[in-house]
Each structure stands twice: as C-alpha cells, then as structure tokens.
Image (spheres, rainbow, N blue to C red):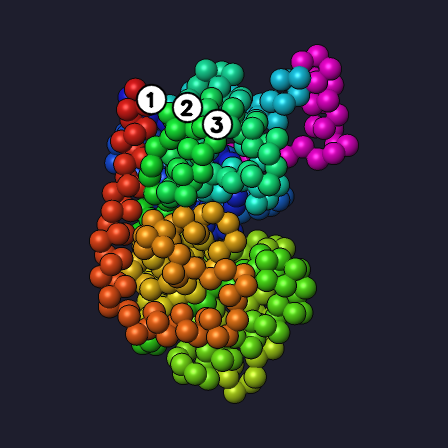
Amino acid sequence: MKELFLLSGNGPYENHGCEAIIRGTINILNEYYNCSEYFVSSYYDNSQQYINQKDNETDISIKHIQNININKYSKEWTLSNLYGIINSDKKKFYKFRNLDEYINNTKATLSVGGDNYSLDYGIPKRFTDLDDYALSKQKPIIIWGASVGSFTKDKEYEKYMSEHLKKVTAIFAREPETVKYLDSIGINNNVYRVSDPAFMLEAKKTTSYNIEIEEGAIGINISPLMVKYISNNNISEFIKQAVKIIENIIKVIGRNLYFIPHVVINGNNDYEIMDTIYNNIDEKLRERIIKVSDKLNAAEYKWIISQMEVFFGARTHATIASLSTLVPTLSFVYSIKSVGINKDLFGNDEFCIYPEQFNEDVLMEKIKHLLDNKEKIQEHLKVRVDESKKLALKAGEYLKNIIR
C-alpha cells in the first residue's frame, strides 16, 4: 500500500531554503516509505505565488495545497469569529479546514520550515494551532528537522510552549542547541536528534543558465534581514558598511566575488539588496563581482555555491549548501539555528559572524583564515558532513518507529 504524507507550514520556493527542506525531506522519506504522493501545504503572500509554484513543480509526486490566510475584516475572518461564538476550537481551527482530508488520510503531518517555532518572526500561533488541530483528530504531528526557541524573552509564552511541545508526537531537532534548550524547559521525552533535511538535497549543475566560475572564487550571500541586526534598520548605513567590506575584500584578497541570492521574495529579496550594494561599489572594483541570477532553483544554487573556494552567507540554507559540499564557510548569525549548526559541525562558533563583528577587519581575518586552512577545514567537514547526512536519514528511521 502506498503511504502519503502532509508537509505543512513552509514558505514558498522563492525562499530556496524552504525548497531545500522539502526536497531533502522527500529524499529521506523515499528511503523508508513507498510513497506515491506528498501533499505540500505552504504559506504564500498571494494566489499568484501559489499558482507559479504549483505550475513549475518538477517533482510529479508533490501536490501543492494553498493554506488559508485569514485577513482581518475579510469574509473568512468574519466567519471564523462567528464560529468562535459557538466553540473556541472551531474559530482556532477554521483556517485548517482545507487540510481536513489530508490530515485524516495521510500517515502523518510533518511541520516543516526549520525555524517556525521561535520568536524570530513573532508568536508562532499558526504552527502551534496546526499541532493542536492534528492532535484533536488523534493524528501524529511531527516538528520536522527544526530549530526550536528560544522563548526566554517572553517567560509566560515560554511556559505555554513548554506545555505545548510536550504534547506533540515528536520533535526532530536539527542541531544540539535546540536539544539543550528544550531540555532546559523540561522537554526531552519526545525529542529526537537529527540534522537539517537540506543536507540530503543533491546539487545540480544548471543547464539553462550560462555561468563561468573562476578558480579561487569567493561566494557572498547578503540578506535584507541583516539590516535589522547590524544597523537597526538603517538601510543606507548598512549599504555603506557592506560596500566598505566588499571593496576591502576585493582590494586585499584580489579574488572574484560571486553575489549569490538564496531568498528572492518580494520585500525580502537577497538579489535586490546585493544589487544595491553592487551599484554603490567603485566601478573598477565592480568588475571583480559576478551577480548570480535570481531565477535558479535550490539544487542549482547549491551547485554554484559548491564551486566556491570559500563562502560567507547570511541565509542558513545557503550556508548548509556550502557546508554540505565541503566549502569553508562563514555564517552570519542572529538566532539559535546557525550557531547550533556550526557547533554541530565544528564543536564551536569560530566561523560564526555575529552582528557586532560585521566589519572589514573581522571578516578579512576570518576569510584569510578559511583560505589558509582550506584543506584542513575540508578534511574535518568530510567526516562531520557524512555524519550529518546519516543523522538526516535517521529522521526517517525514527519516524518509522514512531508511527507504525
């Protein structure tokens, strides 16, 4: 009998980290299950985004479902509030009614997305509500390949999450910092240590996009999120600082730089902010920069990143793409996830760049260190990445034992 799964809670493929999670997850599940279809229920900013993703899907086993967004004062909002008069759960679960048949008829719901269960994007109510909905139907809900927390900034909410997370079927934690944090708030009986499913994404050389990558190339991924953490949302100050750093790298190291986007969502677009930085760089130095297309998929970006000599990335899954292909990597960090992944692979945060370290002196020193110690770092990564891939696959084994 074919077995079906619902993968819910992710963002669109325009965030190629979300795409990497989905494709890596399917590679894992295919090792353990005889699946004919995967139902992927993601959150989109608009209907066109959903249509584009559905129409451009390359894996015939994936069927996309559009989640329901309830906007204030909309018809959906009015109906959900009317249901709330009758029963508070009806209001809470109204937004999941289109998932009913999938939750009922699939083997389990996997709550995917990587860092949804945190305060990085506000209170994660839509995800905890989905957990409660699946549990109310007595169906398994797995928080899959995730970093969780921390919630220490809001002690009351942390208490709530401690009780909530004890109820979910299982938490598959992708790095040790999450396991440590969960244990500190009393959650351990349903926690399983895995690694990010994106470790199981295969790199694929693009055939539709012509790019030559010179030997010794340095890959750079800069995200608009960095503006908040580095310059307190002062975009012009951030651009000025980033330009200074990039120009310094070109002058001192003399390598070609490749600007590689990994999230290209409207309003949260790596390509756009790197294009702005590019346009502010001295014209002569600009010749040493190659802007990589914003039209590729996760596997193609992973291949391009794999060709770099060293890589500096802000997006977690851009750094997973580099680390998993043995490229010495610096990770810009602002939350538990990147620190945890680095500590998992290196045992420390030596290759993390914290917001206060985003300057030409620190970055130059760190990049030089990566270049000077490339072979030693790669030898270390060979062992640790192999272990991470085995841990990623272990998630399938754990799942098989939990939901028989």
For the C terminus, the image quarter is top left
User: Residue under circle 3?
Assistant: 165
Mark 3 and mark 1 lie on one chain; the one further toward the N terminus is 3
SS at mark 1? loop
Residue at 31 percent across and 35 percent down: it is: 395
Is 344 drawn above or below residue 152 in the view shown? below
Q: Which residues are magenta?
A: 65-87
Left/right of residue 28 with respect to residue 76 in the rendered view:
left
Three-letter amino acid code at disc 1?
Ile
Query: CA–CA distance between discs 2 and 1?
Result: 9 Å
Residue at 38 percent across and 34 percent down: it is: 172
SS at mark 3? helix
Mark 2 and mark 1 lie on one chain; the one further toward the N terminus is 2
Residue situated furthest top in the rendering: 86
Residue at 61 percent across and 37 percent down: it is: 154
Three-letter amino acid code at disc 3?
Leu
Quadrant in which residue 60 is drawn: top left
Q: Please report contact status of discs 2 and 1: CB closer than 8 Å, yes or no.
A: yes
Marks 2 and 1: which is nearer the front? Answer: 2
Q: Residues within 10 Å of mark 1 (few under 14, many from 20)?
A: few
Q: Please report contact status of discs 2 and 3: CB closer than 8 Å, yes or no.
A: no
Checking the image for residue 403, the label placed there is: 1
Q: Residues within 10 Å of mark 2 (few under 14, many from 20)?
A: some
